[in-house]
Amino acid sequence: MGRTVGIIGLGLIGGSMAIDLRRRGFAARVIGVEHDPVNASAAGKIGLVDEIVSYEDCVNQADIVVVAVPVGTAVKIVCDILDRYQAAEAKDRIVIDVCSTKEQICQATHYHPCRPQFVSTHPMAGTEYSGPWAAMPNLFDGRACIFADSEESAPKAVKVIEDLYDALNMRPIYMSATQHDVHTAYVSHISHVTSFALALTVLDKERDEKHIFDLASGGFSSTVRLAKSSADMWVPILTQNRENILHVMDTYIEKMQEFRQAMDDFDEDRIRALIEEANRIKKIIR
Amino acid sequence: MGRTVGIIGLGLIGGSMAIDLRRRGFAARVIGVEHDPVNASAAGKIGLVDEIVSYEDCVNQADIVVVAVPVGTAVKIVCDILDRYQAAEAKDRIVIDVCSTKEQICQATHYHPCRPQFVSTHPMAGTEYSGPWAAMPNLFDGRACIFADSEESAPKAVKVIEDLYDALNMRPIYMSATQHDVHTAYVSHISHVTSFALALTVLDKERDEKHIFDLASGGFSSTVRLAKSSADMWVPILTQNRENILHVMDTYIEKMQEFRQAMDDFDEDRIRALIEEANRIKKIIR
């Protein structure tokens, strides 16, 4: 008999995992937990999972539980599941999280007797949309998945979860939870903050100028796209990775002020030098 | 016999216009001027135009000249072409520019006796790439084209240029050069500055952390994409629209600092309120 995967939180990430883990044969059966009744009903209708079950049934029945809820809640749920594994002496079960910040969840579970049964991961994929309606096939294909502090997990459990992400066509990267949080502050979290600030800036202007957005071009849309991201997801991320993000924001504000100064000074050579330095981003993204 | 269109500057915008104006039948013949020999040779090989000609031949032969060079140079070229029209008493010829800032070029030409033969436009389309290799068919389809200070152009000339942009499937929007420069500061120029600053921030970090960019996800790429834009194009835009952009940058830096303060204060309610306010950008972009 094949594996049962239980997914707690049927939003963009949880729902998309449900779709691909089942249709690609990694899971024989996928069960789901969704506390929001509207989302639960939608997930049922869309057919993201074989069955919507209670939290208890999910933890009892699933060989692997994927906790795919915002990071504040995820810490509590993962700890609770490890408690239940301990009480039930369920030594072969595995729980994973898919959160965008790793330090707090890894710290909170560090001393748990069942810590080896927990694998902390961050599949680096997503869109600015959320909820079961945002779930889609192939979301993870070709992207990176970070395994954080994986030396604290049982090698056997890590292997199973490597297979899970292999089924999602992701390439694994291993690092400490601390490193993860520094790196994502730079390549993901700051992008969201700059988009939020950009949206706030133009919305401010819009009060006077009703037609300004007839002009919004492709460049503006792609830069501001992440500002559509949900507060439910991002408040906990920004809070949990607060220190790293504050550090990056300070560097960012410095760079903006350097740019502003060059413009204020009519210093074309300096503006050119800053743009040409920024152009080096080409070596990193296509 | 059909129209001859002359295009000065066979980069992304000029080259893409050449392709579509010819294949959609607006121009019977398209001639081009390109001062950079490498670009000229590439434009010839790609076949962007029927013939690469000298600047003088282009101005003498073309019914419509499109000046598609960076904005600093464009001001000089448009004035020179109007001088030549005056000297030759060539009253049926039209020159247009396609620059991203409009105030200076409209001021510089304001009192020229041949001002009615100049139509100042800004087709709001583009990518972060430049040069003849970046030219592509259908670049302009469905986007907006601004006509600036069009009441200073002869109605007959405006009509011809409306037809030209109609052939490119663009929708015209009419406003003053001053309004244009304020609006584009908000919906285009600031996006570029925030991308440049983001690129500078992460490149700074990269000196210590070689592997940070393995993690660059789709969100980061779309936010930083504009940082690949060329200095040749952007130094003149930022200089010419300096005051408007400085004003927007100040608002932007304020918003970043407001966000930073909320995070520094652990003020989750305030962070949530800022994100939810930023989410209103959904009413503007899809």
Image (cartoon, coloured by chain):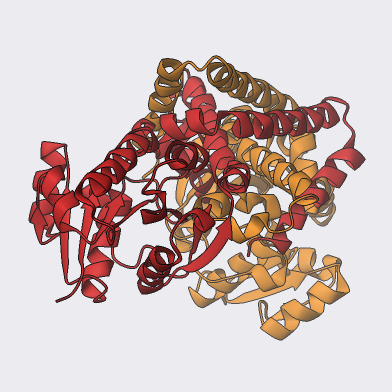
Chain colours: A orange, B red
Front residue of A199 and B165:
B165
> Which quadrant holds residue B154?
bottom left
Q: With respect to residue B94, does A158 lie above or below?
A: above
Residue A180 vs residue A43: left or right? left
Q: The C terminus of chain A lies in which quarter of the figure?
A: top left
Q: The N terminus of chain A lies in which quarter of the figure?
A: bottom right
Residue A237 vs residue B63: left or right? right
- Look at the image and tell me whether residue A20 can be seen: yes
Could you say where residue B259 lies in the image, as x and y percent from the top left? 78, 33
Q: Residue at x 55, y 69 (%)?
A: A21
Q: Residue at x 41, y 54 (%)?
A: B116
Give the farthest residue toward the bottom.
Answer: A45
Q: Residue at x 60, y 43 (%)?
A: B178
Could you say where residue A135 lies in the image, as x and y percent from the top left? 63, 69
Front residue of A62 and A76:
A76
Front residue of A201 and A280:
A201
Could you say where residue A54 lies in the image, as x and y percent from the top left? 85, 71
Q: With respect to residue A10, does A123 lie above or below?
A: above
Could you say where residue A61 lies in the image, as x and y percent from the top left? 74, 70
- Look at the image and tell me whether residue A78 can be seen: no
